[in-house]
Amino acid sequence: MTITCPTCRHVVDLGEAASCKCPNCGEVVSAPVSAATPPAPPRPDPATMPAPQPPTVPVTGASETPAPSPTRAASIVAFVGGLLFCVPMVTQLVGICAALFALLRRRLPNERVALAWVGLILSIAALSAWVFFTLYAMNVSTTASFFAAAPRPARIDADGWERTGELIDEMERIHRAATAYYRDYKRWPDGVEPLAGRSLPRRFTMSPRITYRPVPPTETFSTDWALIVSEPVLYDTDGEPLKEPHRLVLHLNGKVDVLTEAEVKKLLAAQPTE
């Protein structure tokens, strides 16, 4: 191995030695440390080597149980019960119980109870509405039953709306028979007798509470002619009581009017019979 002397810059042959004197200036020249060959490490004896150990898993302080849910099932049930306001009573009671259970029991870390509050408010509001509606319906039903069971005055029994309905039915029956007679003979009958045995029963007798008015030839095509007039009634066609007596007037077109005594007198004066 050759190396340059650091003093005189003379090339010195070291050979196998690690250092020697420079033949030019006598300076001791040593081989650099990096250039020296490191000694080979001793080979380990297999008999003295330790047996291999299995790898160890580092133990941490984390818990083995899973993290709790931020929102429990009770809060969700309370919220759903509050939304189902269309089902009366049952869903509201379930929503209130679930909401109280979610709010009053011990909470988990970072647990959310907003759904429980919303479900509680909705359930209470819906339950209050259903209770009010039920009480109102019961009150209306009780009141209607009371008035339905109450005895009617004697005047209603004597001159009730049934009397008006019976008169209207008989007047319309005679009008249908008279209309059929007109289709056959092209004229209106002078009374009810020609209608017996045809469109009316053979032994039909007109009630004394109504009056048939013959139709003059000049009024054959008139629709306002008063064909039948009834006696005074105290109830209209809808069963409502009248403040004063009225009369039922059936025209040729089949329409039934409820007119006062003054209106009937004026109408009959304008339509005299021959």
Image (cartoon, rainbow, N blue to C red):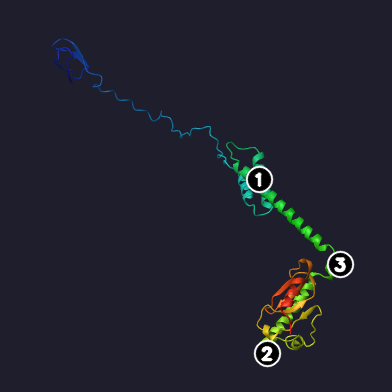
The residue furthest top is: 26
Is residue 28 left or right of 41 when viewed as pictured? left
Label 3 with label 2: CB-CB less than 8 Å? no
**Of pointers 3 and 2, the one earlier in the residue sequence:** 3
Is residue 97 left or right of 46 when viewed as pictured? right
Q: CA distance from mark 3 to mark 1?
A: 60 Å
Label 3 with label 1: CB-CB less than 8 Å? no
Q: Residue 248's image quarter?
A: bottom right
Task: State the SS at label 3.
Answer: helix
Q: CA distance from mark 3 to mark 2?
A: 47 Å
Q: Amino acid at mark 1?
A: Ala
Q: Mark yes or no: residue 260 visible.
A: no
Q: CA distance from mark 2 to mark 1?
A: 83 Å
* Place of residue 154 in the rendered image (x, y in percent of width and height, measured from the top left): 86, 67
Query: Quadrant of the image for the N terminus?
Result: top left
Residues packed near mark 2 inside 10 Å, few (<14), some (14 to 19) or many (20 plus): few
- Residue at the (68%, 89%) spot, across then down: 185
Above or below, 98 relative to 153: above
Which of labels 3 and 1 is toward the front? 3
The residue furthest right is: 154
Q: What residue sits right under mark 1 in the picture?
A: 98
* Place of residue 37 in the rendered image (x, y in percent of width and height, measured from the top left): 25, 23
Q: What residue sits right under mark 3 in the picture?
A: 154
Q: What residue sits right under mark 2 in the picture?
A: 185
Q: Nearer the viewer, residue 225 or 102?
A: 225
Which of labels 3 and 2 is toward the front? 2
Is residue 108 left or right of 166 when viewed as pictured? left
- Residue at the (67%, 42%) spot, across then down: 100
Above or below, 226 relative to 118: below
